[in-house]
Amino acid sequence: MRIDAALKRFREKVDGADEFLSAAKGVLVFPRVIKAGFGIGGEYGEGALRIGGQSVQYYSVAGASIGFQIGAQAKTEILIFMDGAALETFRNSDGWEAGVDGSVAVAKFGAGGSVDTTNIQDPIIGFIFGNAGLMYNLTLEGSKINRLER
């Protein structure tokens, strides 16, 4: 399953990943988010919310952007809910937008790909990585997440 593979890659590529995962109240995994554009861009992916290691609900993520962009790329997005109240707000929402309905701190990476664990205090922490590893200077702001019925 793609979710399991994405979490395995996360553990392999991000020093400190296990610390975040073991403290998480929930983990939202989008194993493959495709972003494409030519002037105007968009992105879309599907994933699952895991609580206690089990998939409990499925979601899609979508976003749009305007500006200089040509081409396409695939990335993995993982949102870790460190706070139970933030997780419940997310689960009870009818369409959730990063930066509007909840603040997501995109993890900062140090030398060698280690995670700055001071971010562990934030209620929701986002990780974005591609085939080559961690991706820098990306944001989840404006990403709209909707529940899928399956």
Image (cartoon, rainbow, N blue to C red):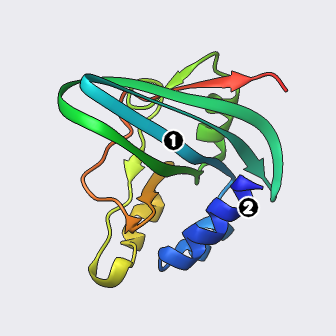
Question: Which residue is located at x 62 percent, y 29 percent?
Answer: 60
Question: Which residue is located at x 75 percent, y 49 percent?
Answer: 50
Direction bottom: furthest residue: 112
Q: Is 140 displayed left or right of 111 in the figure?
A: right
Q: Is 33 displayed left or right of 5 in the figure?
A: left
Instruction: Pinpoint residue 99: horizontal percent, then vertical percent.
Output: 38, 30
SS of the residue at dot 1? strand
Please tell me how crowded label 2 is: few (under 14), some (14-19), or many (20+) other residues with Cα within 10 Å. Answer: few
Give the camera-side residue of 9 and 115. 9
Q: Indicate the amino acid at tag 1.
A: Val
**Badge 1 is on which residue?**
33
Numbered circles on residues, count: 2
Query: Where, quadrant-wise, is the C terminus in this rendering?
Result: top right
Give the camera-side residue of 70 and 149. 70
Please tell me how crowded label 1 is: few (under 14), some (14-19), or many (20+) other residues with Cα within 10 Å. Answer: many
**Badge 2 is on which residue?**
4
**Quadrant of the image occupied by residue 142:** top left
Instruction: Pinpoint residue 14: horizontal percent, then vertical percent.
Output: 48, 74
Instruction: Pinpoint residue 130: horizontal percent, then vertical percent.
Output: 43, 59
Q: Indicate the amino acid at tag 2.
A: Asp
SS of the residue at dot 2? helix
- Indicate whether 92 appears above or below 87: above
Q: Is 112 displayed left or right of 121 in the figure?
A: left
**Quadrant of the image occupied by residue 53:** bottom right
Give the camera-side residue of 36 and 80. 36
Instruction: Pinpoint residue 84: horizontal percent, then vertical percent.
Output: 66, 45
